[in-house]
Image (spheres, helix red, strand yellow):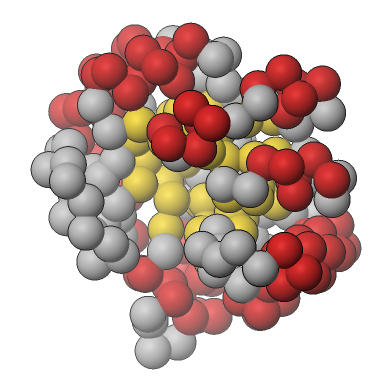
Amino acid sequence: MKLDPFYLIVDSSSWIARLVPLGVKLVQLRIKCEDQDLLRSEIARSKAVCAEHGCQLIFNDHWRLAIEEGCDFVHLGQEDLAAADLIAIRNAGLRLGVSTHDGAELDTALAVKPDYIALGPVFPTATKELKWAPQGLEKIAGWKRQIGGLPLVAIGGISLERLPGVFEKGADSAAVITDITRSPDPETRARDWIAGTASWRT
């Protein structure tokens, strides 16, 4: 499996409707709420936009809803992974991405045979407070050696200026949140990311 090198993460279908038509080919919908009706509505709208524009949608955390709403990809953090019914996820045909922050979490993730591994934070991040220190570029290289052919997604504090080092160390995709959503001009910034990752989009 191959992931697009530009992995956009947003918290609403409105962002997806705004940015995916620009040429985004991989997006994660990450909504931190438990309102099932809202989540179902957000999934449906996001799926429709992504289907129209040939974009891969990844739904975060809520694996039961991902199954019920016919998603084809779910991303789980370590706590969600521990509580998830992995057999149900696989039986539904969902592909699976897993977050990791240290060696123990990587072992846990590899044990469930995911479709990709995410490593972070690579750099300091403004998105949320984390107990893990920034991993740095060398950790990307070590992680990639360990996971072999699995796609590796780097996340945390990544900007366009830092992209070359991230990819040179072995990451297959760079996950981005605030560099776009907090930009004064998110559309232009998204286009910059699409162009800036073009040489790795083969």
**Could you say which quadrant of the image residue 64 lies in?**
top right
Identity of the residue drawn at 39% across and 89% down: 184
Q: Is residue 172 visible?
A: no
The quadrant the N terminus occupies is top right
| Pick the front one: 9 or 191 | 9
Furthest toward the left, the residue is 133
- Is residue 26 shown above or below 190? above
- Is residue 17 shown above or below 83? below
Identity of the residue drawn at 60% across and 24% down: 115
Image coordinates of residue 51 in percent, x first then y, are 85, 57
Identity of the residue drawn at 54% across and 80% down: 187
Image coordinates of residue 178 in percent, x first then y, are 37, 69
**Could you say which quadrant of the image residue 79 lies in?**
top left
| Pick the front one: 64 or 197 | 64
Q: From the viewer's perspective, tell me whether residue 53 is left or right of residue 13.
A: right
Identity of the residue drawn at 57% across and 40% down: 75
Q: From the viewer's perspective, tell me whether residue 46 is left or right of residue 96.
A: right
The quadrant the C terminus occupies is top right
| Pick the front one: 15 or 130 | 130
Q: Is residue 146 visible?
A: yes
Image coordinates of residue 168 in percent, x first then y, are 30, 33
**Could you say which quadrant of the image residue 104 lies in?**
top left
Furthest toward the bottom, the residue is 184
Image coordinates of residue 196 in percent, x first then y, are 44, 57
Q: From the viewer's perspective, tell me whether residue 55 is left or right of residue 199.
A: right
